[in-house]
Amino acid sequence: MAEMNATHTVKHRNRRTFGVLGLAVAGMLGLSYASVPLYDWFCRVTGYGGTTQVAETEADTVLDREIKIRFDASTARGMDWAFQPAQREITLKVGENGLAYYRAENNTDRVITGAATFNVTPLKAGPYFAKMECFCFTEQTLAPGEGVDMPVAFFVDPEIDQDINLDEVKTITLSYTFFEMEKEPDELAALTE
């Protein structure tokens, strides 16, 4: 009888262990699916990693402090687009609205859809760099040989002047990288009709 009770106790512990492990695996899978949107939200709220802010309206104050904005462009490996800023840099007053353009051109013989990621350096300036309009929020589809000029409307938030850790910042670099997006064959056919 004691042997039967010991066997029952071992089976009960094994079931409980497997149940806990199953819940842990399910929890890890759930977190892995949620990690990308949670990380994106975290970066947008905090400016972590040079993530910029999204502004609904223009700044209401323009300061005398000037900041040079440099523009950088690159493409991911295998993305055969010519992609560059129309201007290399501009100088604006903090709070002043800026408008810059980037140009992308498809150098292939096929339709390509791309999406851009972005960041600013120095990373600590991210929370103060606000974009009102940006091509990074939408996919860009270009036919063979087609090109497009894409605007970026932005300003440097006057709150930057209140952050003593950013007093030495005289230049902010806005960088974009284009990546090719995967499209289904029927989606690509509809784009060329």
Image (cartoon, helix red, strand yellow):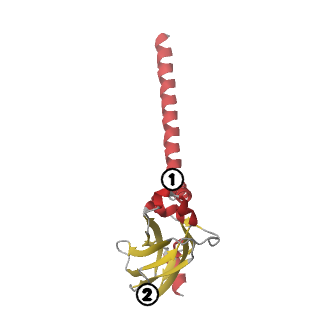
Q: Which one is in front, 111 or 69?
A: 69
- In three-dimensional space, the C-alpha distance between marks 1 and 2, rounded to whole angstroms, equals 36 Å
Label 2: few (<14), some (14–19) or many (≥20) C-alpha neighbours in 10 Å: some
Which residue is pictured at 45% across the width and 74% down the height? 68
The answer to whether 6 is drawn above or below residue 124 in the figure is above
Residue 69, horizontal then vertical, whole percent: 45, 74
Which residue lies most toward the top here?
1
Residue 131, horizontal then vertical, whole percent: 56, 71
Q: Which one is in front, 181 or 175?
A: 175
Tell me whether circle 1 and circle 2 mark residues in contact (CB < 8 Å). no
* Disc marking residue 35: 1
Residue 130, horizontal then vertical, whole percent: 55, 68
Which residue is pictured at 39% across the width and 74% down the height? 75
- Inspect the image, locate mark 2, and give the three-letter code of the amino acid beneath it: Pro
* Disc marking residue 155: none
Which residue is pictured at 49% across the width and 51% down the height? 32
Q: Which residue is mark 2?
A: 144
Q: Earlier in the sequence, mark 1 or mark 2?
A: 1
The answer to whether 124 is drawn above or below residue 75 in the figure is above
- Inspect the image, locate mark 1, and give the three-letter code of the amino acid beneath it: Ser
The answer to whether 29 is drawn above or below residue 189 in the figure is above
